[in-house]
Structures are given as structure tokens and as C-alpha cells.
Image: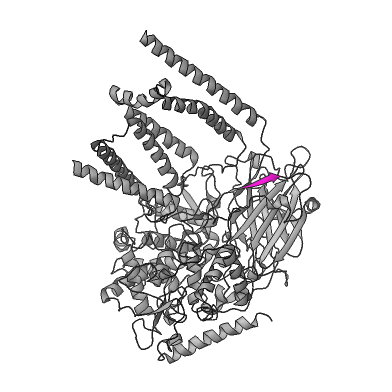
Amino acid sequence: MKALMSVAALIGAAGILLLAAMTVGIVPSNTVRLLEGYMPVQVVFELILFVAGFTGISYMMAAMGMAFPRFWQGILMWTFVILYLKFRIYPPIPFSVRAMYGAVSLVCVFMWVSANEEDWKKFKQPIMNVLDAKTGGIRILRYAYLIILPLLIGGFSYNAMVPKSEEPIELRTVHPAPPASTKVHGKTYTLQTSQNPYRVNLEGKYDQDYSNAMTVEQGMGRLMKPNANPWDKDAQGYLKYVREGGEIFYQNCHFCHGDNLNGRGLHAFAFNPIPANFTDPGTIAQLQETFIFWRVSKGGIGLPNEAAPWASVMPPWEQHLTVDEIWKVVLFEYWHTGYYPRTWD
Amino acid sequence: MKNSFSLKAGALLTTAFGIILVSGSTGGLAFAQGTIPAGFKTGALAPEPSADMIEAGKRVYFTKCVWCHGVDGAGDGPGADRLWPRPRNFNQGTFKIRHTASGELPLFDAKKPTPGQNDLFETVTHGLPGSAMPSWEGILTEEQRLQVLSFVTTQLVKDRKFTDKQSESQTILQLGDLTPIAPTEESLKKGAELVIEKKCVECHGADGRGDGNAFNLKDDWGFSIQPANWHKCWNFRGSRQDPYNVKNIFRTFSTGVNGTPMPSFADNTTVEERWHIANWVNFLCEREADGKPLAIDPSADKPKINFVVSSGLAVGEISADPEHESWKNRARRYVAMGGQITHKPRNFVNRIDDIWVKSLYNDTHIAFMFQWDDRTKSVAEGKLPWAPTSVNVDIKEQEPKTGEEGSIASHQNNYTVYNDAIAMETAVKWKELPSPIKPRYLFGSNEQFPVDIVKWEADGSLRAFKGTGWDKDFEERLNYEENIKILFSEWKNGRWTVIVQRPMGDKKEQEYDEDTFFEMGQYIPTVFFAWDGHNGDAGRKMAVSAFYYTFLEPPTPREAYIYPVVITFGVVLLEGWVLTRRSNKRKGKAL
């Protein structure tokens, strides 16, 4: 038990030191990177490590006879959560959301310290001690509190009332409901029944199993299957169209959606919201191919009313590309990210 | 032609390398006589990567890289012709960012992904900011990055061989052993003198905005190339996602930038001099008012963006002098610009990628100061062959695939020159727009919810337009122009400063249906447009920003002084109550 706890304590201490150093900037802030697409898992994992670490530290200190009062444990834990949310998570989350998480964790901390009568008493003890002020030292502390507390609260309320400018928060509908059909270059496509004419096997038949088998591998790097190179001179059918779609993508789309389809293109940083990240499992992986066809063809101006704030600079690509070119780009986007389009059945 | 010297030097240098490349047998190249410049050491060539690595790298290359760099690595992939700078042509083995001496191959060892000892690995890891080359960290694993480089260096570099001891040498800058000199006032002063003495300013411009010799520089492949703008260090190709690190600057001009007119200064400067220059160049990079580096957004490697442009209350008239106290004390806001690639003619290469905005207001007017870097002052030479207000004009735009001759890179500096210009667009009836208040489209929602555009051009004109929708031409507002005024405009050493004043608008007295009403304390949707005349920018071929918000800072209300005092007093009372209660309780217990 002791060995286990000392390991945990070590992890905790190392983690806190690393985080602090990264925040202050002694260690480069990208030492432990939050990876795109893996961030939620990573954050949960880190938090588990820290909780284990804290448990270890408090156990070790108790074992060494320097037990840490429950009161300070609670306060430190809460402070840690607040700081973690503020400095670790990137891109930063807005204050209102942080305040929400902060409130929830405060409730959790209270539940923890008041789990039973004895703990609650221990937790209250330091507060009561200050109120009673039995020794000279604590009396001074009490007077300090009496003076500082009103000043602090007064200062906060002044701060809150002085006019400030903060970016208005925008919520965005990620996947607006699609229309039943869409008319592109004079032809009507029913979203329920349309198929990508280029998702075909070597015989030229629509074949999703065939194309799924030829798409890039999931996992780090998302590399193509060794025997399915669209740049192979003899590539036919699906793979040939993937290459043609890729050519169109790197002539038109990568400026915003990025060389790796992650929404980090050359111009992306200028726009708000930033362009869609196709490698994120929440975008094209959740949608049918026809939905993408509709979005690409109609662009930002084709967004339905409920998809506010529209503020999208996505062009209606029907103005620049042919129907065939749009289908090929859609084909390429699924190939390059390794996702399978959703089907209706 | 005061710039001809550096041009000739650049040409000579490139020819010299050319000759050495062709002869290929001199060995040791620049420092064959054992005259190794200060700070460098001779290193050994890295061993050839294993066949497995090369084969695995091919798979990475044909998934990720081929789209820009091409099947044979000649920098001619499908995406190449619409990019500037063009993707690297690997065939010649010419690489920009290195620790090796000028003209030498970069460091690459498939077994050693160590910082400072593997130039190509770092390039792939951190990308080349300011170009389309992204950072591949977090996308490709370390192993995959080494694999793809094994493939590129052995199969696609065709004119040179990384392992040929006869023709190649490695003279390596020992950056890890050199300690930077603190950027004291004295060091900066020396640096400022050295950039003149060493003729850096001939290309990089008197203020370092890259405007010195912007028209005549070509790279090894004959494409136009622009000297770096020292004020935007986050766009330095060699910034390695750490733009304010002085070591990156020191490295770049110790080793030169192969393939470009940028020579190595290792031979004609001491190490100490180089630190002074690096300190000075680093000092010039844009900073906060207190001198701290700008916060950089790690996901974009550009300065962090705040979408609120706040306007401060001016006492009396708004000053027309950008050096006036009232302007100098205003905080400035960084506005990022992207190419307008929704309407024809699309702008794939926007040469203005950011502007700085300040704003002041008084009872009747609001003024905006725009400052942006533009290497060339452009005043229209030709007449625009289409109405600048029209949208989706039927003109030939850059074809997707043209070959090198027709590519955007070879068009640079050959465009018909139009006016440099800046414009701002605000929503007219922003208050009535559904929440959150933004027009539906960049160029206005519709007739009912138009936008109000004020555009300044380098020929001295200031005009107003109305935008009524995504695909609608702008309408010129002739009756409005007398209300708007240019307070200041100047192009100096690669930077435009323009101050434009316009009425605040007022719901009661003015036509609220046509003008934006700048109401205090409210968020007014605002968009910025910029044109670089030498990039052929005109009409909708321009750089655009996202929606920002103009916010007129209200003066502090009286309540902000009263309530906090009341609250403080309340807390004191509360404290008294708690203490009394506690002591009563204890007394009760004691009794």
C-alpha cells in the first residue's frame, strides 16, 4: 500500500510541477500536447492521474506525521480544478462555462468534505477557530479577515460594474437539418436516394464495401493502405476518382480546410468560426455523403434559417465546380480521413 | 538604383552555387580550405536510412505530401499553381532552413530526431509559417515523419546525395553551445547600426518591413520572392513555432536561406555581431504596448485574436495626427485577414494577412486608424476592366492547373497595378438583426438589412457603398460622401497608416435605414477589407476579415462608485452579525 501510494504521490508531484512550469513558461507550454481528436480522453486521463497523485501525497504526508487538514485539502483541490480549466484546456473555454464547471466542482468538494459528521467537523474546525480567536496569532488573523474581506468584495463588485467589452458568445448549429432535395446545376437531387456516382468498384457499380476497404487506415497518421495508392498509374475506379477529387481539393479547398483536412488551412486563422475539421469524428463521419454534397454545393449562403449565426465564408461551390467535381471532392474527403459515410439503413 | 548591389550579390551567389552544384566534385564546398566560420564545426554525414524506412516513407508521401509536392517531388503537385510561395522542389536538394553552412544540404538523420540536429525533421514537425506547409506534429508520428523524410532525401532529391562524401560536407552551426547576448539597449543599438552596415536594409527595408527590394528578387527557380518582414516574426519560415526566440533569427542569417538571395553572414560577421543583429530583428517584431511578445495562438501560429475593436472617448475634435497623445494611448487590435475566395475573381494569395485597428469617438463622429504592412505603395496605373463594385464578374481567374509558367508564383509583380485600399463594413440595422447580431452574409443580408461600406483608396478617394446581399453588386452612395473624411493617409517604409472619420449616426436625426448607428456600449458587427494594388487586387479580389465587433467604451457610470461602497458596508454588518452570534452561542454553552 505504502509503495503504491508513494508512486502515486510522485506522479502527482511531478504532474503539478510540470503543469505549473508550463503555465509560468519555464518549460515550453507544448511539452505535453493536447492532441487533436484525443483531447477529451487525454483530459480525463490527466485528471485521474492527478487525483491519484493527490491521494498519494496526502497519504504520504499523513504517514510522515504531517497530516494535511481537510479544510486546506478541499480548498486546494478546488483551486486546482479552476486553474486546470483555465490554463490547461486549449482552445480556452469561455468564462461562463468555466464558472459552471467551477460551481459544479465546488458542490463536489462540499459533498466530499461533508460526507460524514466527523469529516464535516474537521472541515469546519479552522473556520470556527478563526471566529473564536482564542490565541493572539489567530486574533490578528481574524482582524485581517474582517478588514480584507469587505474590501475584496467591494473591489470585485466595482470590477463587475465598470463597463468592459467581452466577445459576445455565439452558439452554433453544427449540423443543420438538410432539405429533402437540392437542385444543383439544374438537376434535382433527393438527399435520401442519391448516391455518389464515383463510389464504384472496378466494374463501375456503386459499392460501399469496396470503397470502405480501400480508404485510409484509422490510427495515427491515417495512411493509405499499402496496396491502395490513388497515385498508382494503373489505379482504376474508386481510387482514380479519389485522386481526381484530391486534385480539386488541393486547388480549391485546402486554403481553409487545411492540407490535412483539419480546418487549419492558410486562411483559416482569419475566420470565425474556423473552417470545419473533417478529421474530427463529429463532422463528416456523422453524416451522409449527400449531406456533404448539399453543403458543398450551396455553401454558407445555403444554410437554413435555424443554422445561425450563418457567418460562414464557405462559397456555394456550384458556382465554381461541376457536379462531378463536387462528388469527387466529397469522395476524397472520406478517403483522406478514413471515415465511412453514414448510410440511410 | 540603390538596391542594385544586393541584387547583384544575390545573383552572383546563386550562380556560384549553381557552378558548384554542376561541378559537384569540389567537396567541402565553401570552406574547403579549412576556414570554418566562427560558431561552426565540421560534422559527419549521416548514414543512409534503411530500405524499410524509405518504403514506409513512400506510403506517407503519397497520402499526405504528393498533393502539393508532386509525384516526382518537383514541387508541381495539383495544388502548386495556386500557391505562393510555391511548394518546394526537392529535386535539387535545396532547403531553406538549416544549421549547415550556406549551400550545404540540411541535417537529416533518420535515427536522430533531436532538436538542433535534424533540420528536415524540424521543418516537417513545425511546418513553415507564412506558407501552406503546416506543422505535422500531432498528425504524423515521429516515426512517420522520419520515414517520409527518408523517402524524400533518397528518392526525390535527385541532383545531390545526402551520403556522398565526395561531393557533400556538413559544416554545422553549434547553436546549442552559443549563448545569446542579452538584448540590452546597447546591444539593440549595435544591432540597429549593423543591419545598415551589413546592408540588410537594402532588401529588408529601412524599417525592416521587407520593402527594400520587393520587385527584383528571384529564387533559384526564377520565381519572385519577397524579403522577410521583420515585424511579423510569426511568419518567419524558420520560426519553428517559437517566433520570439532570438536563436531562430541567429540561425537563419548564420546559415543563409538556400535557394534565395538571402546569403549567409557567417563569413563577414563575428558571433557577437550576429547576436546584436538577431536581438534587433527580434526587437522589431510586433509587441504589446509594454514590450511583451504578442500572445501566439498555438493552433494557428499567429497572434491571438480578440474580436472586439473597442473605441475610446476623445475629448473634443478627433486628432488627425497618428502621433497625437490620444491615438498613441489607444490600444490597438490585431485583425487577421484571409483571401476572398468565394467570389470570382478569387484571391488565393492575399499579400495583406493582417491589419492593426485603433478607434476613437466623440459626440458626433467616430474615427478608425488602420495600419497595415504593404511592401509596395500602389496607385492605379490601369483602368479596371470591370466595375469594382460588381460581384461574380465574368473574367478569367487563375486556372487550377497551369504549369510553372502560368502559376500564381510566376505572376507575382507582373499584375496590372491597381490602388491599395482599405474598407470597413458595418451592419446598418444591426439592432434588429436576430441574435447574435451579425448580418447573414459577408456583404449584407438583403435589401431590408443592408451593410454600410466605407472605402479608402490610395488615389486619395473615400467612397461609401451599400451592400445588400451575398451576390449583389455594391451600390455607390453618392449623397453620403460629404459626411466622411480622410483625416490622415501615408505610406512609409512599407506601412500604410490611414485615419478615416465618419458620423456616429443617430437614430433620430439621420436616416437609420441607411447609416450605421454607432451606439455606445453595444456590439456593432464590423468587417474589414484590404487590397494590395501590386497583387492585382481590385473589386472583390481582396483580403477579408471575419466579423469583428466595434464597441464604444461607455464612461464609467456613477453607480459603479456607489454600489460597491454599499456592498462593502453590508459585508461589514454581516461580519458583525456572525461574530456576535458565535460569541453568544459560546457564552450560552459556557453558562
Looking at the image, which residue is at 46% across and 73% down? B97
- In the rendered image, the quadrant that contains the C terminus of chain B is top left
Given residues B10 and A58, the one toward you in this image is A58
> Can you tell which quarter of the image residue B166 is in?
bottom left
Give the image location of residue A158, x and y in percent.
Answer: 59, 33
Residue B305 shown left or right of residue A91 in the figure: right
- In the rendered image, the quadrant that contains the N terminus of chain B is bottom right
Looking at the image, which residue is at 49% across and 38% down? A96
> Which residue occupies the extreme top position in the image?
B591
Give the image location of residue B56, x and y in percent.
Answer: 29, 71
Would residue A189 be visible to someone looking at this image?
Answer: yes
Query: What secondary structure predominates along the stretch shown in magenta?
Result: loop
Q: Is residue A202 above or below residue B260?
A: above
Q: How is the image coloured?
A: one colour
Residue B188 shown left or right of residue B585 in the figure: right
> Can you tell which quarter of the image residue B405 is in?
bottom right
Given residues B251 and B516, the one toward you in this image is B251
Looking at the image, which residue is at 53% across and 65% down? B235
Given residues B417 and A243, the one toward you in this image is B417
> Which residue occupies the extreme front position in the image?
A136
B495 magenta-colored: no
B311 magenta-colored: yes
Extent of the magenta region = B309-321
Residue B177 shown left or right of residue B259 in the figure: left
Q: Is residue B397 above or below residue A193?
A: below
Would residue A234 be visible to someone looking at this image?
Answer: no
Looking at the image, which residue is at 38% across and 79% down? B156
Give the image location of residue A227, x and y in percent.
Answer: 28, 69
Q: Is residue B53 above or below residue B321?
A: below
Give the image location of residue B590, x and y in percent.
Answer: 36, 10
Given residues B573 and B107, the one toward you in this image is B573
